[in-house]
Amino acid sequence: MTPRLPLIALGIAALLAVPTAGALDDLATARADRDAARADLAATPATVAVIGAAFPADNATDAARRLAARVRADAARGGVLIESLAADPAAPAPLAILTLRASGSEKAVVAFADLLERGGPTVRMAAWRLTSAPGGVRLDARLVAPWRG
């Protein structure tokens, strides 16, 4: 019995080698497709799909000012403290980009973030982080909103 066991194991390994090689080829193809899609996405600038979603502004500075005013008004209504709010001067022409740091009770900050995302004009958080802070939570976010002249 002992001499047959290694032969059986070798036979099973040979049978499993074919599907394993196919699976590894499929995985390599999927990874190459994913990398190509990421490269295409990085090379293609984001466009605003709906012009009606953009808010009116005279120029990039005016757009950042209007967006900041909306953010401050929403925060004041919700009882959220704006610790810092700064415009990104390198924002592409059809977008206003602000860096936000706000704090307050968890309920108030989450409601504030929800109001920003759902309210009009369209504002999206490109990146955000919610962390614990003394007396509540702190929201660090990068706000992006389209504007039209």
Image (tube, helix red, strand yellow):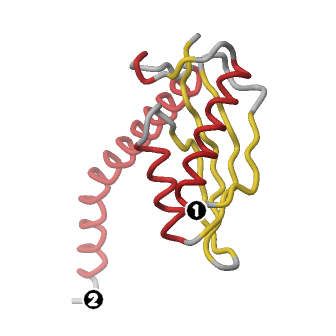
- Where residue 102 sits in the image (x, y, percent)? 66, 58
- What residue lies at 27% left-to-right and 51% top-to-bottom? 19
Q: Nearer the viewer, residue 69 or 95?
A: 69
Residue labelled with disc 1: 79
- What residue lies at 53% left-to-right and 71% top-to-bottom? 106
Residue 2: image tag: 2
Q: Earlier in the sequence, mark 1 or mark 2?
A: 2
Give, as a three-letter code, the residue at label 2: Thr
Q: Which image quarter holds the C terminus?
A: top right
**Alpha-carbon neighbours of circle 2 within 10 Å: few (<14), some, or many (≥20)?**
few
Dot 2 falls on a residue whose secondary structure is loop
What is the spatial separation of the Cα atoms under label 1 and label 2, in whole angstroms? 78 Å
Q: Nearer the viewer, residue 54 or 36?
A: 54
Q: Quadrant of residue 82?
A: bottom right
- Where residue 72 sits in the image (x, y, percent)? 64, 46
Give, as a three-letter code, the residue at label 1: Gly
**Residue 26 drawn above or below residue 46:** below
Q: Which image quarter holds the N terminus?
A: bottom left
Toward the top, the furthest residue is 149
Q: Nearer the viewer, residue 148 or 13?
A: 148
Q: Quadrant of residue 15?
A: bottom left
Q: Nearer the viewer, residue 44 or 54?
A: 54
- Where residue 97 sits in the image (x, y, percent)? 66, 33
Residue 37 as seen in the image, left or right of residue 43: left
